[in-house]
Amino acid sequence: MATNDSLQSFPQSKRKLHLFHTFCKLRRLMFIAGLVLLPQLMSAQWNATVGAQSHDLGRQGLAFLPNEIWIHAGDSITWTVTADEPHTVTFLIDGQARPSFTIGCPGFSAGSAVFDGSTCATSAVLFKGSQLTVVFPVAGNFKLVCLIHSDMTGIVHVLDSSQPLPHDQEFYDRLAQKEATALVADEDATKPKHQHSQNGVTVGGGEVIATGAGSDTLSVMRFSDPVITVHAGDTVEWTNEDSTTAHTVTFGTEPQNPVPPSPSVTVDPDGARHGVLNSPSDSVHSGFLEAAPQDRDGLAQAPPGVTRFRVTFRKPGIYPYICALHDGLGMKGKVAVIP
């Protein structure tokens, strides 16, 4: 026969048993949640840089630094632009036609993106200090490109989490610094170029450097003779000898659209564009001066690029000019016309 004490303790024991079962359920739920969240908690955040430059901004390294990186599926990489020349961080899908940097994939990712190879992802134009973080959820080898600079590529190797990684972040930091220093310090781009006329100015200069992950580019954002003196009636010729970067020769007012030349510009028999200035207050614009893209098997041959611009100066005076794309980097010049 049950006593009063045992009857009173029964509800209390029942409550304890209920609390015990509830605690066990919570532990199971926490364990399951841990299994789900553990891969995300273990995902690594990597860092890389975009671009490099000399102290005077005249030498621009158009490169992803480091040019090649290995990570695990689920990891992310944040690219930070460290130079004054703008860039994009872009991943296209296999077989996709390369779009213009003005329209994106189409469309742009702001701040962060996910890329698994099925849908393209790109930043808008990134300026110094801007970033894009990309998460890579699946394994694969993914090509990285800049939509502004055609010979600027890299590779991200995304490995399964069961595979070891060859390097750590400290290694990539050292490598990026080493690559940036070597790229900007390369002296080949400053060697004398072809001179096709007595009054000739080389517009920029540069070279494409092959890497294990694609290509980097060094571009010199300067006119070889920033100040040149000629006589009234003379013609000066500017030649872009940079293999990948477009430049302009712009006197007076900058056009809103820098791609086409001024309406007054004519074309000489050899394909060079030609403008005339009657006074320092006049304006004339070369349009884009750039080499033709590299020909590739299976694609139509590209026509010759427009690389030369000539200007005839009718009257004496001081005629300042700029590259409308890179004057912010110091790419400016002046023509002194004497009688």
Image (tube, helix red, strand yellow):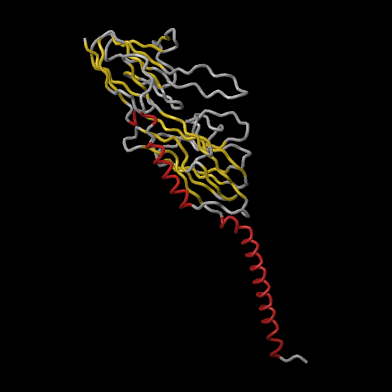
Q: Position of residue 301 (x, y in %)?
A: 57, 19
Q: Is 36 positioned to the left or the right of 322 in the image?
A: right
Q: Is 265 positioned to the left or the right of 23 in the image?
A: left
Which residue corresponds to the image point at 36% horizontal and 20% vertical from the top-left? 249
Which image quarter is the N terminus in? bottom right
| Numbered marks: total | 0
Which image quarter is the C terminus in? top left
Give the quadrant of residue 237.
top left
Q: Which residue is nearer to you in this view: 39 or 299?
A: 299
Q: Is 272 positioned to the left or the right of 43 in the image?
A: left
Furthest residue to the left? Answer: 339
Q: Position of residue 123 (x, y in %)?
A: 50, 37
The relative height of residue 135 versus residue 58 in the rendered view (above or below) is below
Q: Which residue is nearer to you in this view: 186 or 298?
A: 186
Q: Position of residue 84 (x, y in %)?
A: 38, 36
Which residue corresponds to the image point at 63% horizontal and 31% vertical from the top-left? 95
Q: Position of residue 255 (x, y in %)?
A: 38, 20
Q: Which residue is nearer to you in this view: 324 or 226?
A: 226
Which residue corresponds to the image point at 61% horizontal and 38% vertical from the top-left? 119
